[in-house]
Image: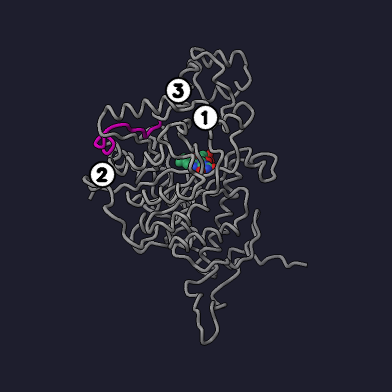
Amino acid sequence: MPKKIHVNLFEMNCVGHISHGLWVHPDNNRHRFNDIEFWTELAQLLEQGTFDAVFLADVIGAYDGFRGGPETALRESVQIPNNDPLLLIPAMAAVTRNLGFAATFSTTYEPPFAFARRMSTLDHLTKGRVAWNVVTSYLPNAARNFGLADEVEHDRRYAIADEYLDVLYKLWEGSWDDDAVIRDVDNRVYTDPAKVRYINHVGENYRVAGPHLSEPSRQRTPVIYQAGASDAGRGFAAKHAEAVFVGGFSLDDVRANIEDTKDRAVAYGRDRDHIKFLAGAAVIVGRTDAEVDRKVAEFRRLRSVEGHLAHAGAGLDWTRYHPDERVADIIARQDPGHQRLTSRFRPEQTVGEVLERFGGFDRGPFFVAGTPKVVADELERWVDHGGIDGINLRQFLTPGTAADFIELVVPELRRRGRYRESYDEGETLRERLFGAGRSRLPAVHPGARYRDPAALAATTPEPVPVG
Ligand SMILES: Cc1cc2nc3c(=O)[nH]c(=O)nc-3n(C[C@H](O)[C@H](O)[C@H](O)COP(=O)(O)O)c2cc1C
């Protein structure tokens, strides 16, 4: 049996997510992102295409590093204006039955208790179709929005995230028994108090008493997605994640990163197969080569290199230079912002080459432009040789990118036995990834240990009495 491909749509509640500049394309609908219909129509389209899920990225600050302010990001709509991702989910869930929803939320700025309830609410409303993309946030402006002078140090953010998840697991997995709600009218007992407990978490960063306020939802813990690339980030993924956005410079690099994360997961007592790996994929498909070439040329013409520079937080305004100037010249002149160039660029690179790289949607490891056969070949190569389980489909146009994929690529993948024919009705998102009957975290996952009330009590000291 050929391995089937999981497909998520890479989205964000904003105009310009990662394909900067294409908001000016006449076929792009993204300026409608404030309308609920934009999201309900998109969800219905994805469900027609039997996508696994829509994946919603998020940032909680502005990109104001480039040219010392947010002006470029604002002008080119680089993730601003943006809106909350979680609030889209009930709307999209109401018009679909099977599509999954993976939303990003940061562990760095808002404490865990309210978020635990929000995710449980979403898991109830969607009947077990939600995932959470755990991020620790990288924008300095985000820190300043939440009362801090600057970003929390990188590895410390992951240490905080680790405790954050510990609190959530206690609330989601440990605070309520499955059979706590009995709705016993005769004896006037809605919830059996003996089956609900405080968590009494006292840690370095959080003190949370519990009990959790939501009763158990189908998945309890939402499916945990994560995209860390650093050593700390990969360690975090190995311990917690069930779906990883794997990065890398090439197919071989991606395969090595997958193996590394799986090895680390085993060291945490987990199973190698308990993590799925998704690669960000840029796919431009057309019925003919001419149609494909036309689309690629159009996207290249309309893209905004400045938008990409703002997104990357480029400390140097590369647009000020002649394209033939070399990195070595800029360093030699000690121009403002030159300090970080040595580690990130080669001295002989020209400004033109650097700008091309920043704006180049066609040079990531997974870029394919071609007819359905060419695209399907490349997807199969990444699954069979790269070791990925699926993709996070990058959008150039909304709804064009997803519509093209559904119309042209999905039938080709189905012909090859690589893509589901239909959903298994009523399955949870975790079941879609790991198989029927597996709606809950597996027993070897670190979050599962709190199902045992003794473990919950053992890991949490008694709270310090108040007064
Ligand atoms: C596909 C993908 C999606 C991501 N989405 C977000 C996001 O929505 N919000 C965010 O703050 N960071 C996002 N990130 C950044 C990661 O959370 C992470 O910070 C980054 O990959 C660097 O890894 P590190 O934190 O381990 O250094 C994303 C990364 C990737 C590869």
**Residue segment shown in magenta:** 363-376
Number of numbered discs present?
3
Q: Earlier in the sequence, mark 3 or mark 1?
A: 1
Query: Residue 291: horizontal and vertical position, in percent?
Result: 29, 29
Q: Earlier in the sequence, mark 2 or mark 1?
A: 1
Residue at mark 3: 356
Asked if 47 appears above or below 367 in the picture, the reply is below
- The local crowd at label 2, few if under 14, some if 14 to 19, many if 20 or more residues have their Cα within 10 Å, is many
At label 1, which amino acid type do we have?
Gly
Residue nearest the observer in this picture, 382 or 289: 289
Most distant residue in the right direction: 467
Residue at mark 1: 307
Residue 245 relative to residue 164: left or right: left
Asked if 391 appears above or below 271 in the picture, the reply is above
Report the Cα–Cα distance between label 3 and label 2. Answer: 32 Å
Is residue 369 in the magenta section?
Answer: yes
Asked if 459 appears above or below 146 in the picture, the reply is below
Query: Residue 423: horizontal and vertical position, in percent?
Result: 31, 56
Report the Cα–Cα distance between label 2 and label 1. Answer: 34 Å
Looking at the rendered image, the disc whose residue lies closer to the viewer, 3 or 1, is 1
Dot 2 lies on which element?
A: helix
Is ligand 1 within 8 Å of the beta carbon of the residue shown at mark 1? no
- For the point 41% across and 47% down, the residue is 42
Residue at mark 2: 413
- For the point 50% across and 72% down, the residue is 177
Q: Earlier in the sequence, mark 3 or mark 2?
A: 3
Task: Kindly indicate the quadrant of the structure image that contains residue 98.
Answer: bottom left
At label 3, which amino acid type do we have?
Glu
